[in-house]
Each structure stands twice: as C-alpha cells, then as structure tokens.
Image (cartoon, rainbow, N blue to C red):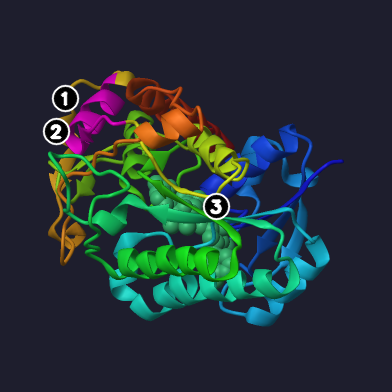
Amino acid sequence: MNRTALVTGITGQDGGYLAKLLLGKGYRVFGLMERSTRYAFANLDYLGITGEVDYLDGDMTDEASLVQALRQARPDEIYNLAAQSFVGTSWRQPIVSTEVNAVGVLRLLDAMRHFVPAARFYQASTSEMFGNSHEDGLQTENTPFHPRSPYAIAKLYAYWIVNNYKESYGLFCANGILFNHESPIRGREFVTRKITDAVARIKHGLLDRLGLGNLDSERDWGFAGDYVDAMWRMLQQEQPGNYIISTGETHSIREFLSMAFAHAGIDDWEKYVYIDPAHKRPAELHSLRGKSDKARKELGWKPQVSFEELVRMMVDADLERVAKEKAAK
Ligand code: NAP
C-alpha cells in the first residue's frame, strides 16, 4: 500500500527536494502551506512537481489548522520542515521565530499525539544549536549545545520537546541535526545563494558589487538533494534516533567566492566584493564541521555531491535564470 506523508515547509528549499524524493518513491504527498503574498510555487515549479502535491492550508502558529491538516492527510510520516529559517531575521523578529520554530513544533507534535499517534515524525534540527561548541574542531551527536541566536535557541527547544514526546509518549520521533545545505533553490537571503545570484548578475552586467559580512566564516556545506534522503532514511529505521547530517568538510566564504566567480569566468573576485558592516551579527559562529559517522553507519547515508559540484550547480542555475530574466526585459 502506498504511504502518505505530510510535509510542512513545502514551499521551501528542503520541502521541494523532499517532496520530489517521496513522490518518486510512490508516496502521496500533502504539503502544508501558509498564506503567502510571495510566489509560493517557484521552487516546486523549478523541480517540476507543482501539480503532484496535495496542498493544505496551515500555519505553525495556528493549532486548529494543524489539527485539520493531520485529520485530512492521515499521514504515515510527518516531516516538519517549516521554520523562520534565517538566523539574521531571528535577531530582528525573535518572537515570531520562537513562535514558529519552537512552540509551532509543540503544536504539531501534540496534534500528532492526539490524532495520528502511529505516525512517524521528523524534526528539522540544525547545527546552529552547537554555536561555537566543538570537540577537536568537530560536532557529533554528543557535543554540548550552546546556541548563539534566537533561531538556534528556538530550534533547541524543538529538539528537546521532540525527544521528550518520544520518551514520554512512545511516539516515533527523530531529529536530523543538519549542517548547512544548499541548492539552486536556496533562499536568496542565505550567503551561498546571495553569492551565486550576484555572480550571475555581475556576469550579465546587471550588478557592480556585492556586500558581505565575515568572509572567514567556515561552514560544512552539502547539497539539499542529498540531505532530504537522510531525512527519509531516519523515518525508515526500526527505532527512532537523532543524527548529524554533514559532509565533514569545511570551506570558507572566501573559498566559495573564489570558486563561484572563477566558474563564471571572472578571476578577480576581490574587485567585486566589499565588507558591509550591516551584515555583522550580534554573535557570530566561526566554524561548523559535522561528524556524520552515525548516519553513515546506521542509515547507510553519505553525501553524493561535492563542494565543487555544488558551487558549479548553483552558479550555472543562476547564470541561466538571470540570462532568461534579462532576455525577457
Ligand atoms: P526555507 O527554504 O526557508 O523554507 C522554510 C519553509 O517554512 C517555507 O516553506 C516557509 O513558507 C515555511 N514557513 C515559514 N513560516 C511558517 C509558518 N508560520 N507556518 C507554516 N510554514 C511556515 O528553509 P529550508 O532551507 O528548506 O530548511 C528547511 C528546514 O530545515 C527549516 O526548518 C530550517 O530551519 C531547517 N534547517 C535548514 C538548514 C539549511 O542549511 N537549509 C540546515 C539545518 C536546518 P514561506 O515560503 O511561505 O515563508
């Protein structure tokens, strides 16, 4: 019998890639969608699956809509990807970020407990929960958390309430502690996409310069398409667990810039980039590098796309998009 999944955050980067993966496996996919003034289907259109998802109205701040969505979808698996997902915005809107990323998760979990207790629950946890905490330069499932933004603190609440509902009520709940993952449909406020979008616009003569924050920050960047596969694998285990998902490699923003500009045929990237103090955050994270041995062993998961391939994929997609937009003007 085909299984049914409910994906919150369906219009986001991961929601799109996950829906595509689940549809390919024969799932019926329900996507929870908040009322949005933006063009909601851009990512799903890019992935070619807009017409294959069943959409349900709902908002993580509105409990009744979550109950209604669960009653309608009766999902076997729930993937909670909805979030105010940008760390920078969480400093400016800490309460909304907490309502959605922390209390929203409790609302959904509690609704699951009452209406679909046999369902399996995936929570989109994040490496941001570690802050600058590490063991020999790496983060594992046992590294102490020390969140350094309202975003990360809300996500840490969600992480613990998910564990608590698993232990208290015997629900099948898993936390994926995902390190940064990107793609051609990454939100344009995130540094990787900001760079590839700017590279494309500079190449096409539509932009002169790009302002960024700390170029020495290092991140462990993977491809979103690989990471959603890990989410699915977590819900296929006999026992629920928490897993780090990462590549184990770090690269600086400087490296990302140099590779992205070079791929577009522009060698002297320093000429186009300046440091904009407006991008500085009240508390910075310097380096994140995850050790995903547990996932590799228990889930049989490993990343397929390299850092270089990821940068090239994003630059190529933005070059093509900007060329089309320019031609349409
Ligand atoms: P994203 O592209 O920003 O997508 C977030 C989604 O959540 C969007 O569909 C958004 O809808 C929806 N959403 C926001 N507020 C909502 C609300 N009140 N009710 C219902 N839906 C709401 O994020 P992503 O990159 O796909 O990430 C997916 C999840 O993984 C997020 O929880 C994120 O925090 C987490 N995560 C991401 C990364 C990463 O590197 N990408 C790493 C670790 C964890 P609108 O488009 O309508 O706003």
Magenta run includes residue 94: no
Label 2 SS: helix
**Residues in magenta?**
248-262
> What residue do we see at 82% from left, 66% from top?
72
Q: Is residue 174 above or below residue 24?
A: below
Q: Is residue 319 above or below residue 72?
A: above
Closer to us: 323 or 65 = 65
* Image mark for residue 92: none
Residue 318 is at least partly visible in this image: no
Q: Report which residue position mark 3 lands on.
A: 12
Q: Does label 2 point to a residue whose CB lies under 8 Å from ligand 1?
A: no
Are dots 1 and 2 in contact, CB under 8 Å? yes
* Image mark for residue 268: 1
- Label 2: few (<14), some or many (≥20) within 10 Å? few
Q: Earlier in the sequence, mark 1 or mark 3?
A: 3
Are dots 1 and 3 in contact, CB under 8 Å? no
Main secondary structure of the magenta stretch: helix
Q: Quadrant of residue 138?
A: top left
Amino acid type of the residue that numbered disc 2 sits on in the rendered structure: Lys
Label 3 SS: loop
Cα distance in 3D space between marks 3 and 2: 33 Å
Q: Report which residue position mark 2 lands on.
A: 271
Where residue 197 appears, x then y in whole percent? 38, 39
